[in-house]
């Protein structure tokens, strides 16, 4: 499925200083300049705690690329708000580890590389990145 | 009003057909400002998918060419408001959104730092140690006796203590500095380290709270004998420093714990809840 039919969600992690501000700004800037439609949220944690209904509409809309933090955390933030993500239709770009260039590259790539964990995950279970 | 009872304002920045796109810098500045103010925003451009209406109040921002109402095909929801932002700078755009938020009486953001445990149910064994441990009523059990986070806003900011007692490293705090508590993958070394931390806590006297109780009682006893409140305070601070470093618990959390009697009462209440939940499963 191409990216045109998939959604993009960007989390600004507004209420913590765990993401590199320069990386956040660079990713957001790329999104703003792309001409694409996207969803941007101040803080996924806050939305999860509030059980924000927006999480349900985001989770139920087919392919979704999420620029946020660790895939395991994102998976359970959605799940605990009653909005489970489809593991086959979700790719999480971890801004705590990826630099802005790589995150941007994946956000706008046409393919989707599902990577949210399923089952009890250990280091050896992490999906290997697909060959380029 | 609890966190979950508050309704939300959805912000839509419309730049599709019938609206002039914003200047690139203005778009970035306005979106950045709105995110910093805590809003969630949908940017509608010329391509790509956006999430559908979810029945909440929404404000649609845009540089509308022929009036905004042409954008709606049905009787527009009463909850839908349009704001023409032609000629606005980012500050004025953010101000207009904040005014709409106030008018619609929707959730105000930023008054609570979203710090709370997130359970990884792939790892959780429902042992209820977290429920027994937490003194602040963050955890509860559902009708089937499954552990749940029920009161996120009761959690003490920056305190990851309950994740330390979880034998499976199933409790995450996504805003924590290090893995696996922040959601990073769990390694065998992590599991051993987590176990070690629980053991340290056991060595200190069962759990950090019972240690605190004991030390506090001792300090109280000394205080009554010596009538030296300075010494008692020093003793308490020494104890708290040790606890803070052993469990990475912020000193301000420890300093603001309730009285030893109240701690005991809450601990018993939490344990009773955990036992009841476990019994319900059998």
Image (cartoon, coloured by chain):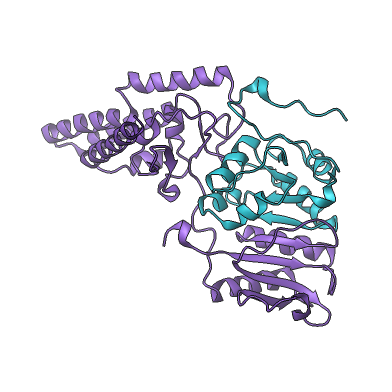
Chain colours: A cyan, B purple
Determine whether A97 is above or below A43 in the image: above
Q: Above or below — where is B86 with respect to B143? A: below
Residue at image point 50% right, 30% down: B170
Q: Nearer the viewer, residue B183 or B123?
A: B123
Q: How many marks?
A: 0
Depicted A56 relative to depicted A1: above or below: below
Q: Residue furthest right?
A: A132
**What residue sits 54% from the left and 48% below the top?**
A81
Extreme front residue here?
B282
Q: Is residue B121 left or right of residue B44?
A: left
* Residue B209 visible, this orientation: yes
Which quadrant of the figure has residue B228? top left
Q: Position of residue A109 (x, y in %)?
A: 85, 42
Check the picture and name the quadrant holding the N terminus of chain B: bottom left
Residue lying furthest left in this view?
B225
Give the side of residue A131 with respect to residue B2, left or right: right
Residue B19 placed where, x, y %? 83, 73
> Which percent across, then down, holds residue A103?
78, 41
Locate residue A102, reporting x and y percent: 81, 38
- In the rendered image, which quarter contains the C terminus of chain B? top left
- Left or right, B123 with reference to B83: left
Q: For residue A42, say whether it is visible.
A: no
Q: Is residue A85 above or below residue B205?
A: below
């Amino acid at each position: 499925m191409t990216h045109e039919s998939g959604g993009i969600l960007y989390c600004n992690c507004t209420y913590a200083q765990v993401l590199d501000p320069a990386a956040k700004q660079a990713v957001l800037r790329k999104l703003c300049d792309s001409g694409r439609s996207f969803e941007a949220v101040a803080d996924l944690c806050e939305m999860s705690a509030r059980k924000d209904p927006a999480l349900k509409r985001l989770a139920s809309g087919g392919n979704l690329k999420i620029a946020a933090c660790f895939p395991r955390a994102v998976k359970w933030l959605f799940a605990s708000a009653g909005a489970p993500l489809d593991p086959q239709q979700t790719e999480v770009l971890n801004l705590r580890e990826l630099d802005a260039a790589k995150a941007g590259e994946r956000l706008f790539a046409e393919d989707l590389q599902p990577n949210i964990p399923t089952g009890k995950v250990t280091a050896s279970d992490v999906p290997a990145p697909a060959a380029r | 009003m609890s966190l979950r009872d508050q309704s939300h304002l959805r912000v839509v920045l419309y730049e599709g057909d019938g609206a002039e796109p914003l200047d690139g810098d203005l778009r970035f500045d306005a979106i950045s400002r709105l995110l910093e103010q805590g809003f969630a925003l949908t940017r509608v451009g010329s391509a790509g998918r956006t999430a559908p209406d979810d029945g909440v109040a929404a404000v649609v921002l845009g540089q509308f060419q022929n009036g905004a109402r042409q954008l709606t095909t049905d009787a527009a929801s009463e909850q839908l408001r349009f704001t023409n932002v032609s000629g606005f700078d980012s500050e004025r755009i953010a101000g207009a959104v904040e005014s709409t938020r106030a008018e619609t009486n929707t959730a105000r953001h930023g008054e609570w730092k979203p710090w709370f445990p997130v359970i990884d149910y792939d790892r959780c064994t429902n042992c209820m140690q977290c429920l027994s441990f937490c003194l602040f009523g963050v955890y509860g059990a559902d009708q089937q006796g499954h552990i749940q986070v029920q009161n996120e806003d009761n959690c003490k900011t920056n305190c990851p203590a309950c994740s330390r007692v979880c034998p499976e490293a199933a409790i995450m705090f996504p805003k924590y500095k290090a893995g696996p508590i922040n959601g990073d993958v769990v390694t065998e070394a992590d599991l051993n380290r987590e176990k070690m931390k629980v053991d340290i806590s056991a060595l200190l006297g069962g759990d950090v709270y019972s240690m605190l109780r004991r030390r506090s009682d001792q300090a109280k006893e000394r205080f009554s004998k010596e009538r030296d409140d300075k010494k008692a305070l020093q003793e308490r601070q020494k104890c708290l420093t040790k606890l803070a470093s052993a469990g990475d618990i912020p000193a301000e959390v420890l300093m603001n714990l309730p009285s030893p009697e109240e701690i005991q009462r809450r601990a018993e209440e939490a344990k009773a809840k955990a036992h009841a939940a476990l019994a319900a499963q059998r």
